[in-house]
Amino acid sequence: MTEQKTSLVARIGVVLLAAITVAAWLTGHWFLTAIPIGVLFGFFLQKGDLCGSSAFSEVVLARDWRKVWGLWVAIVVSMLGIALGDLLGWIQLNPKPFMWAGAVAGGVVFGIGMVLAGGCVSGCLYKGAAGNLNSIVALLAMPLGIGLVEYGPLQGWLTRLKQIRIPASDGGPVTLSSATGLPFWTLALILAGATLGWAVMRRRRTGSGGEPPTDASGLPRLNRPWKAWQAGIAIGLLALPAYLSSAASGRNYPLGVTHGVLHASLLLTDAPLQHITGVVKAAPTSSDPAPPTPRKKIVWWLVLLVGSLMVGSHVAGRLSGEVHLLPKPPEQVLVAAAGGFLVGAGAALATGCVIGNILSGLALMSVGMLLFTVVTILANWATTLVYLRGVR
């Protein structure tokens, strides 16, 4: 797409996203702000091609750490944004508890599945939006795996795994902050400083060759791919707005996509449902018995985030001329479907995926999510060596 058309699309996009944000403010329906956040999130993912599965697999296949570095940059920038929000009293930190058994079991299944599917949950979302058939099929199979664990025969196992946890000394979640006694913001600054120092040292050692084309402002062009670390910075800057938007919509947590995929499928297959569009207030006491609550909840912030993520990814692919249907051999499609099922089941067992557990979980310094990250990477590497290297 030409620079002129790209500029026009960008301006129209900014106006539309700003209009949605203003509408959310005027109406008090803050869950609508998931749309601009999701569009930007999907745009940045596609530009940097930041899929957790390919990032980890490329370390084994090509000794290429650039995407892993991009993910780490996204985590550190997210951490700084969350620390700022915490210091200002804008957000309430909500790290996931140290459910070590679920982290291990889910990490193994998830790590294997992401290689077979050709992507993690977010990876299949943005690749599917650009026409990758394997990603589309894997994405359709994911709700089946999540549902099997959360609502099906494995629900009891999930309940038992959630009960196996290690609390901090104060009874709360185990985090790097609770383990070291250092404030969250102090650890965030230490990790950010170490990351910046490593980046400067590495740049001096290797030089700045291979930079992508930029516009007059020095920013990466919208119609060209971005370097992984550039996309990582952009994604990290979304963490605090996403946290604020999510908390105002009845979900006190940063970015996450697993349950958005599940909830979108429930809208098509189940009823009745409990629709969450804002902070749920405690019901007033009454002598009358409370009406039965529907078993399955729909968090509209997550549904809109996932849907708009695909829109943003599609727009980013269109700008770069990368949107086209990619047919695959039938056997690969079947493997991708099986992988998508495993990705969904593993994410359900571990209560999240690369975005919810690794990006947001590590940004909140959860020790349980650190364990999930290590197990997922090791399972990914083992499956890559057995499956992808064998296929190649």
Image (cartoon, rainbow, N blue to C red):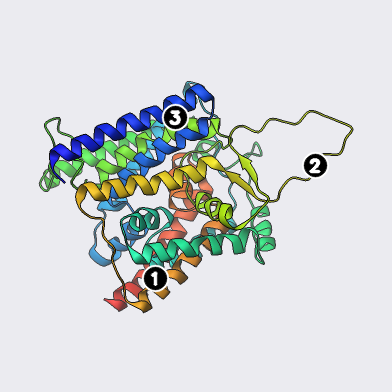
Q: Can the viewer see residue 182?
A: no
Tag 1: amino acid: Thr
**Taking 326 as reference, is 266 left or right?**
right
Tag 2: amino acid: Pro
Residue 290 is labelled as none
Residue 383 is labelled as 1
Which secondary structure lies at badge 2?
loop
Circle 2 residue? 291
Which secondary structure lies at badge 1?
helix
Tag 3: amino acid: Ala
Across and down, in percent, residue 359 comes to 42, 45
Of mark 1 and mark 3, the one earlier in the sequence is 3
Mark 1 to mark 3: distance in Å? 36 Å
Residue 83 is labelled as 3
The foreground one among 270 and 306 is 270
**Taking 365 as reference, is 55 left or right?**
left
